[in-house]
Image: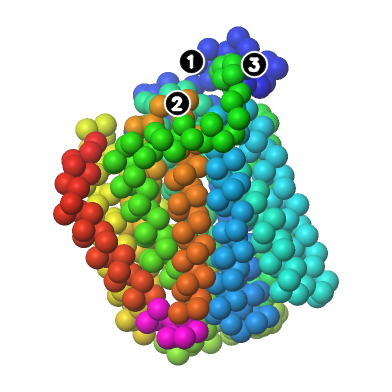
Amino acid sequence: MSRSIHPSSSNLSAGEASVPARRIPSTFRALRHRNFRLFFFGQMISLVGTWMQHIALQWLVYRLTGSATMLGVINLISALPLIPLSLWGGSLADRFPRRTIVVITQSVMMLQAFLLAVLTWTGVVQVWHVLLLALLHASANALDIPARQAFLIEMVEGKEDLTNAIGLNSALFNGARAVGPALAGAAVATTGEAGAFFINGLSFLAVISSLLMMRLAQQPLPSSRAAIASHLREAVGYVWSQQIIMVLISLVAVSAFLSMPYSTLMPVFAKEVLNESAQPLLDYACRQASALGTSCQSPEALTYGLLMAATGLGAVTGALVVASLPATARRGRLLTFGNLGFPALVIGLSLSRSFFLSLGLLVGIGFSFVTQNALANTLIQILVPDRLRGRVMSFYSMSFQGMMRLGGMQAGLMGDALGAPLAVGIGAAVCLVYGLIVAWRYPRLRQMT
């Protein structure tokens, strides 16, 4: 059996699917591949909507409950499907056409966004609605991530442009992270959360269309389909035997659990910790909104959106740096820089009471976070054999997504008990200690290219 292909693509050569490399700047060289270009521009639209929904959803939960713990509960709910479904998703990605899997999962997430928009617009939304729809989204996402990660190598036709494609994909994700929160903050501040959810639902049409337009070369699927348990045991055995892959996954997991939860508590920072220093900006924004004939229903949402947008700006810069790395670059050295810089800057954020200083710190946080994660993703995909890629990437995505969600839960509980700044600072300090231990114990990591 072979992977599904576009009806008109069976005789396409690689050259017909690509733009000559000399016409593409090195930072964007993966865009010479037609399939990756389609994916890139489809994702560009869809991810802005995704970030708008993410920001609006957290704001909705905090508005309905006023509880940092409930922000953590949303993250916990999103983590529940990850372990069983991401592992199954990795197995599916090594057995079935990856494009088909991604189209199905993206369609389910589109439906979830429209349901959330309708419930919020009609004013009947309750916390249990949000929890149930978050569970649906997380289930689809758990199956989507390993298939989408493993699909990248097909879109760029091999490993030559894989690092660049991962860097550009990360730049795209985080560019949307810069734009989406700002748009969501403005939308929620003036019209409420439903508009952000509806825009997200529409945005999925772009990425689904781009996937369906791709022309994929035939790639053989395994002729023997072993039971899922034995299929997964093979991948577990491989990961367990590869010390450097275990170290890379552990760095991502610890960082996601202890440092990344700062983003879960960002509504608390926006509304309580930094509200006083941001007040002159909010007053100005509300005056402008009044001049345009619109109301200023929730001005603190603008503070939140700008804080998250600053993180996205730094992350885009970091991702473009990764995409521009030459083949001989010491990727491990830059990864170590990101792994140590990320928690150090989060500690600074926990101590800041200035809105504008926090914006600057968040730019650095976004940069260091992406250099760590994009390079860990790249190094793992370069090291792993093609036949195991989907399953190994499912372990990576499960570690990152699962620990990030669980970290959000612990941060929510700690935030209610100790206050958001102290909760964030303690987690980041422990993460920094772990990063220093890894840098000392595994010098080989810093030498990787």
Of the 4 image quadrants, the one containing the N terminus is top right
Answer left or right for 150 relative to 196. left
Answer left or right for 312 relative to 91. left
Residues shaded magenta? 415-423
Q: Amino acid at mark 3?
A: Met
Residue drawn at (22%, 33%) of the image = 328
Check residue 35 for magenta coloring.
no
Percent coordinates x, y for residue 323 in the rendering: 35, 41
Residue drawn at (65%, 51%) of the image = 139
Circle 2 residue: 386
Quarter residue 435 falls in: bottom left
Circle 3 residue: 1
Percent coordinates x, y for residue 424 in the rendering: 39, 75
Q: Nearer the viewer, mark 1 or mark 2?
A: 2
Q: Relative to 169, say whether 199 is above or below.
A: below
Residue drawn at (33%, 36%) of the image = 241
Q: Amino acid at mark 1?
A: Gly
